[in-house]
Image (cartoon, helix red, strand yellow):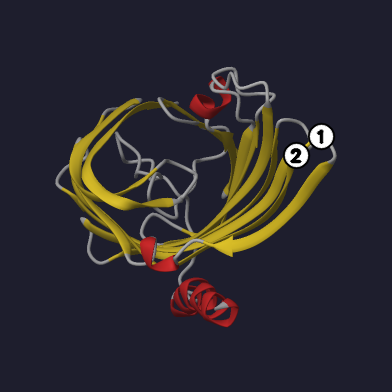
Amino acid sequence: MVRFITLLVVLSTVFPTTIWAQTPAIAAESTSRTAPLPTQRTARTLAQNEWLVGLWRTQYGLLESLDVGTYQLYLALGMPNAFIRHAFWENDKHAVSLNVDAFYLDSDFLWLYGDEASAFWALLIPIEFRTTIAASDQLFLTFGVDVTLARGEGQVDGDTTQGLAAAQQLILPLTVEWEFSQRYLVGLHMKYSPFAELVGEGDTTVQIDPTTRADIQAAGAVDPQAYDHAFSAIAYVLFRWETFNLRVGGGWGSLSLPGLNLMAANRMPLVDFDLFWRF
């Protein structure tokens, strides 16, 4: 499986870069545009010193083709996180980029978590490879490879029960966007997960009577078929002005929270909503 993921990563980054290597790079945002090209769900980055402040996240163009940011909604819930995005190659038509996130989940930070008898922590590292291709002046295709690695540990009732868990999931996203005008575009965002794995081990202590205690150890894995082949498809419209942007849409499939890139097994109706400012 590791070789399969490595092959997909190489193909999604090296191949498009090789095709366009002879094309001179120009500024990521055209100065003739009243509304910049979208960066969300694409391989594009912000212009240097440009801000994107939205409902879910805040992003800043630290350098040309290098962005940093955070998901403030998760911060408000007590989950520290940060991400960095680097575009290896970018112009106003094509782009190839790498995005790395880090999320730290700790029961001590979660103000909504009220169970004092148990404690846990988890570290999630979502890695996103993206390639954006301009099929025409109005039609843009973005595809890539998402790999999310997670590891955590927890205990219940002090040292009575404790365990360790690890997870990884591979997601293949595809986004098609048609730019009808500088003011709005329509898009179709799809995700498919061909592989997922969740394993864990733990031990517990059972006090049978005042003089007898049993230590039990166990290990196991969640049936990967419950998460393999998870998918989602969302159609949306993005309205753009010089600074304000609004995206609304809906679809069907497996739920995937923004940034975390972990798809659930169950399918349900999905709502797509976001608003943000770029300045």
Element on which disc 1 rests: loop
Q: Are marks 1 and 2 in contact (CB under 8 Å)?
A: yes
Where is 133 relative to 163, above or below?
Answer: below
The residue wearing badge 2 is 207
Residue nearer the viewer, 177 or 101: 101
- Residue 116 occupies quadrant: top right
Residue displayed at 44% across by 57% down = 91
* Quadrant placement of the N terminus: bottom right
- Pinpoint residue 233: horizontal percent, then vertical percent: 23, 54
216 sits left or right of 81 in the view: right
Q: Is residue 192 visible?
A: yes
Q: Of the residues shown, which amino acid type is indicated by label 1? A: Pro
Q: Distance of mark 1 from mark 2, alpha carbons?
A: 7 Å
The residue wearing badge 1 is 210
Circle 1 crowding by C-alpha within 10 Å: few under 14, some 14–19, many from 20 = few
- Pinpoint residue 171: horizontal percent, then vertical percent: 42, 62
Residue displayed at 53% across by 74% down = 5
Q: Of the residues shown, which amino acid type is indicated by label 2? A: Gln
Residue nearer the viewer, 203 or 165: 203
- Pinpoint residue 19: horizontal percent, then vertical percent: 44, 79
